[in-house]
Image (spheres, rainbow, N blue to C red):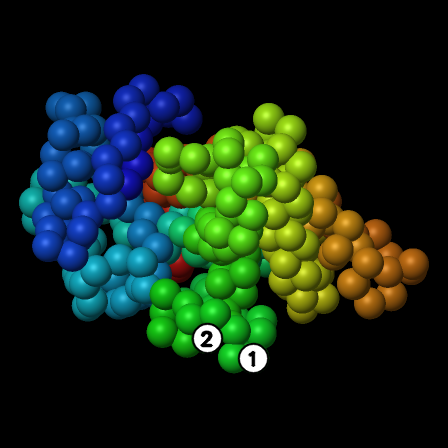
């Protein structure tokens, strides 16, 4: 969990804590973290959380990576701290940051994909966040492979089972188990096989690690191609912990998307770029939404 305090658009304090486990209710963990960050001059609080969030009520309905259901987080925070609160899906919050003050500034049609523990998503259309009824952008759970790997959501073969940090970890663990004397096994011996460890090995030039990152990038690119065919964005922004690693992932993604898009020789693929605010975009965007709520540029009833 990442918490930031903004002064204007500038991050003046930042704290990263481990995600709440099943034993610590999410609402309590949020209250504790917000309480630690609060100073006298904080006027509003914003939260971005992975999963289904009812807008504008700020009710966390359910999410495969967060414990708890039906949590009235906005009400909870407003009564705990006595200041206005806004609670949204974390990818929507990231899209708000990237669209208003980041990589997608000036674009009217934007697809944002966060790639980390899973895949989150948000759509900006005609300059406004598109929410559907409330839950639009959950394409991490679109079906990518029939009878594929089991997803955290309980289904099989969702896109995030092949394009996420856990997918990269699984690929690396399988490879190391089959090649215990290989360079990657030697490099990763004595440490946990995490997405971060594998991307670091790739950055340091390990060919196997580069190949595994490229494989995840290719599956990212195929999914992005589907989104581009569906939504025709002017730009695709990729954020999240894994999504922000850069060219080792996005290079293969761009090549696969360019190859797979229909009418590819008659159209330009939109730019596919890293989120300017990187893995912090969700937290920064939520804080920016809180600031915009105070200034009146965000209207909770209107939804954007
Ligand atoms: Zn799923």
Residue 247 seen in the figure = yes
The picture places residue 70, in percent across and down from the top left corner, at: 19, 68
Quarter occupied by the N terminus: top left
The residue drawn where x is 83% and y is 52% is 268
Residue situated furthest front in the rendering: 181
Q: CA distance from mark 1 to mark 2?
A: 7 Å
Find disc 1 in the rendering and name its residue: 146
Residue situated furthest top in the rendering: 12
Give me the disc on residue 193: none
Proximity of marks 1 and 2: CB atoms separated by less than 8 Å = yes
In the rendered view, does 110 fall on the left or right side of 303? right
Residue 139 seen in the figure = no
In the rendered view, does 61 fall on the left or right side of 33? right
The residue drawn where x is 11% and y is 39% is 32
Number of marks present in the image shown: 2
The residue drawn where x is 62% and y is 33% is 206
In the rendered view, does 90 fall on the left or right side of 102? left
Check the image and report above or below for 50 versus 159: above
- The quarter of the displayed image where residue 210 is located: top right
- The quarter of the displayed image where residue 14 is located: top left
In the rendered view, does 61 fall on the left or right side of 288? left
The picture places residue 74, in percent across and down from the top left corner, at: 20, 53
The picture places residue 154, in percent across and down from the top left corner, at: 36, 74
Residue situated furthest bottom in the rendering: 146
Towards the viewer: 201 or 238: 201
Find disc 2 in the rendering and name its residue: 156
Towards the viewer: 157 or 257: 157
């Amino acid at each position: 969990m990442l918490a930031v305090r903004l002064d204007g658009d500038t991050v003046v304090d930042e704290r990263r804590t481990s995600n709440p486990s099943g034993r610590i209710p999410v609402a309590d963990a949020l209250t504790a973290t917000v309480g630690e960050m609060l100073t006298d001059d904080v006027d509003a609080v914003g939260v971005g959380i992975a999963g289904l969030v009812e807008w504008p009520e700020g009710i966390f309905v359910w999410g495969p990576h967060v414990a708890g259901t039906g949590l009235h987080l906005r009400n909870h925070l407003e009564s705990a701290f006595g200041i206005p609160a806004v609670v949204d899906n974390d990818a929507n919050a990231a899209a708000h940051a990237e669209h208003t003050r980041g990589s997608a500034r000036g674009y009217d049609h934007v697809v944002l994909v966060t790639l980390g523990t899973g895949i989150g998503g948000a759509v900006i259309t005609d300059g406004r966040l598109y929410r559907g009824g409330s839950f639009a952008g959950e394409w991490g759970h679109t079906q990518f492979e029939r009878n594929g790997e089991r997803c955290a959501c309980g289904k099989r073969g969702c896109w995030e089972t092949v394009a996420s940090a856990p997918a990269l970890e699984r690929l690396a663990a399988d490879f190391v188990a089959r090649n215990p004397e290989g360079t990657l096994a030697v490099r990763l011996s004595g440490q946990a096989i995490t997405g971060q460890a594998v991307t670091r090995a790739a950055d340091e030039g390990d060919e196997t690690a580069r190949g595994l990152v490229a494989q995840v990038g290719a599956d990212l690119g195929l999914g992005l191609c589907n989104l581009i065919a569906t939504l025709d964005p002017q730009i695709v922004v990729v954020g999240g912990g894994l999504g922000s690693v850069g060219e080792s992932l996005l290079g293969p993604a761009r090549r696969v998307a360019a190859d797979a898009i229909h009418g590819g020789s008659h159209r330009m693929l939109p730019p596919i770029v890293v989120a300017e605010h990187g893995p912090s975009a969700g937290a920064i965007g939520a804080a920016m939404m809180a600031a915009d709520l105070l200034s009146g540029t965000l209207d909770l009833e209107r939804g954007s």
